[in-house]
């Protein structure tokens, strides 16, 4: 198999997005679109990946630099068409000998199987391979004109097509592959003698055919090739992804009571025999183990949920939450960067941030880990079997020992020994008859005020 490389075109300004964020940095399923294309290139084992950006796209440049390094990005300035964009990557591929696929940073749904098919037609002798689709409404798409033996003869733009060519429903996606040296040699012959004054990548097919070389088209579903130029396109891509992912999750042995109300991220892992109630959102970085029930209106991100847990309703698990076996996190409980041991419970109205909670711990309603001093975060540690009474504030850094009990309404600022009782609250005052006198006094004040207002 020939070596493989990918050139990802991402220099478009994306004006229809109406955003300061580069178009390809907008997310689908919790992942920037550019990352979908990079992951696709990695999935088909591309040894070199080059992203073509515009120098003004600093957030994209920084992001790609973190993923691919400075060698993984080249610049197109000013933009002069797709052919020009690919040529901008020529020097970056010096010394590379193999096949190159041209991808787009705004197309997050392209399947790896389609790119493998493109590389396969090159292996079978095609000079250029083009990815196409059967369009329900071909409209202004370029048409792929095939030969009688199934080869690709030309790509014809709709505005230049004959009536017979317009009747063709096989359309061009823009995704193309070819051997590196041949592709660059042909690109050097492409001119910008057209209405837009741009260099078109699609001209490669005609040039290759004039040299007597065969070209080929492979196809995939039209949905797979959706390019996201607007917020509406983003919403459509998200809907397509979620629909497909829900089917996959259901087929894997997961129960969803209302699948259309559940949203997954690109990397969500849900094991079989999990039950998901309506209106649950999974952000990136979530793993849910078998036997767990996620109850309605919960939001989970960056969390590992062990087996046989119960989460929600209305629970929030933030990044760094780790729940071991048989843990219960109830309504309006938020967990962040905290591990809860086997059998521990926080059933109501609690915030658990930056902590380690042992096994069999009960955390009462209204409990807060006071983890932030205005400058730094601090750790709360609770030993096995401890009981934290309702409406308690644990001021970190602090350790509550095994089997200790914290009385309800306490503010705990010092470590608590194992099996000790800690109570930190003001002494209760009790004055007989005070409430009767208070009500009498206030009723008289109110009556006097009302009389004055009415006079």
Image: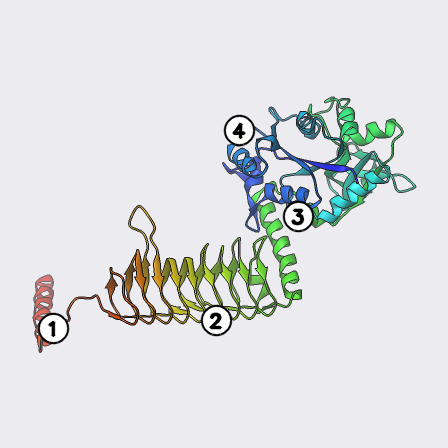
* Above/below status of 191 relative to 291: above
Is tag 3's residue or tag 4's residue first in the polypeptide sequence?
Answer: 4
Q: Position of residue 87 (x, y in %)?
A: 69, 26
Foreground mark, 1 or 4, reads 4
For disc 4, the marked residue is 56
Which of the image's four quarters has the N terminus?
A: top right
Q: Which residue is mark 1?
A: 439
Would you call the spot at circle 4 few (<14 residues within 10 Å), some (14-19), or many (20 or more)?
few
Give how far apart the Cα atoms at labels 2 and 3 are.
37 Å
Q: Assign a secondary structure to mark 1.
A: helix
Task: Give how far across and how far down residue 64 sits, in percent.
Answer: 56, 36
Q: Which residue is mark 3?
A: 109
Of residues 361 and 225, the one nearer the viewer is: 361
Foreground tag (2 vs 1): 2
Q: Which residue ends up furthest to the bottom in the rendered image?
A: 432
> What residue lies at 55% left-to-right and 46% top-to-bottom?
27
Q: CA distance from mark 3 to mark 4?
A: 26 Å
Would residue 358 be seen by someone viewing this image from the given angle? Answer: yes
Viewer-nearest residue: 243 or 184:
184
């Amino acid at each position: 198999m020939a070596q493989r490389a990918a050139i990802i075109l991402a220099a478009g300004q994306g004006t229809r997005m109406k955003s300061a964020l580069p178009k390809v940095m907008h997310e689908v399923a919790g992942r920037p679109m550019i990352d979908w294309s990079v992951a696709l290139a990695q999935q088909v084992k591309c040894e070199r990946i080059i992203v073509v950006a515009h120098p003004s796209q600093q957030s994209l440049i920084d992001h790609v630099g973190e993923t691919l390094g400075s060698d993984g990005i080249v610049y197109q300035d000013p933009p002069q068409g797709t052919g020009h964009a690919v040529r901008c990557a020529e020097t970056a591929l010096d010394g590379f000998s193999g096949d190159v696929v041209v991808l787009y940073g705004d197309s997050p749904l392209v399947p790896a199987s389609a790119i493998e098919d493109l590389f396969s037609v090159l292996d079978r002798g095609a000079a250029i391979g083009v990815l196409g689709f059967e369009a329900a409404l071909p409209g202004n798409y370029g048409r792929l004109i095939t030969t009688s033996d199934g080869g690709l003869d030309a790509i014809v733009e709709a505005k230049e097509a004959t009536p017979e060519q317009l009747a063709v429903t096989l359309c061009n996606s823009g995704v193309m592959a070819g051997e590196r040296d041949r592709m660059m040699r042909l690109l050097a012959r492409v001119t910008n003698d057209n209405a837009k004054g741009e260099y078109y990548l699609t001209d490669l097919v005609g040039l290759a055919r004039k040299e007597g070389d065969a070209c080929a088209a492979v196809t995939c579903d039209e949905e797979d090739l959706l390019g996201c130029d607007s917020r509406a396109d983003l919403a459509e891509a998200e809907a397509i992804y979620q629909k497909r992912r829900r089917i996959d999750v259901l087929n894997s042995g997961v129960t969803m009571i209302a699948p259309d109300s559940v949203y997954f991220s690109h990397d969500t892992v849900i094991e079989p025999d999990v039950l998901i109630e309506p209106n649950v959102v999974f952000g990136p970085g979530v793993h849910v183990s078998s036997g767990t029930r996620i109850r309605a209106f919960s939001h989970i991100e960056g969390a590992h949920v062990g087996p046989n847990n119960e989460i929600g309703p209305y629970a929030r698990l933030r990044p760094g939450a780790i729940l071991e076996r048989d843990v219960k996190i109830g309504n309006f409980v938020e967990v962040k960067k905290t591990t809860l041991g086997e059998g521990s419970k926080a059933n109501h109205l609690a915030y658990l941030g930056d902590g380690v909670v042992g096994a069999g711990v009960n955390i009462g309603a209204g409990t807060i880990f006071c983890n932030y001093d205005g400058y730094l975060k601090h750790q709360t540690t609770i030993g096995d079997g401890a009981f934290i009474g309702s409406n308690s504030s644990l001021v970190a850094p602090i350790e509550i020992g095994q089997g200790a009990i914290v009385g309800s309404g306490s503010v705990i600022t010092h470590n608590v020994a194992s099996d000790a009782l800690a109570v930190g609250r003001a002494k209760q005052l009790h004055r007989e008859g005070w409430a009767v006198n208070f009500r009498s006094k206030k009723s008289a004040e109110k009556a006097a005020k009302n009389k004055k207002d009415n006079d």
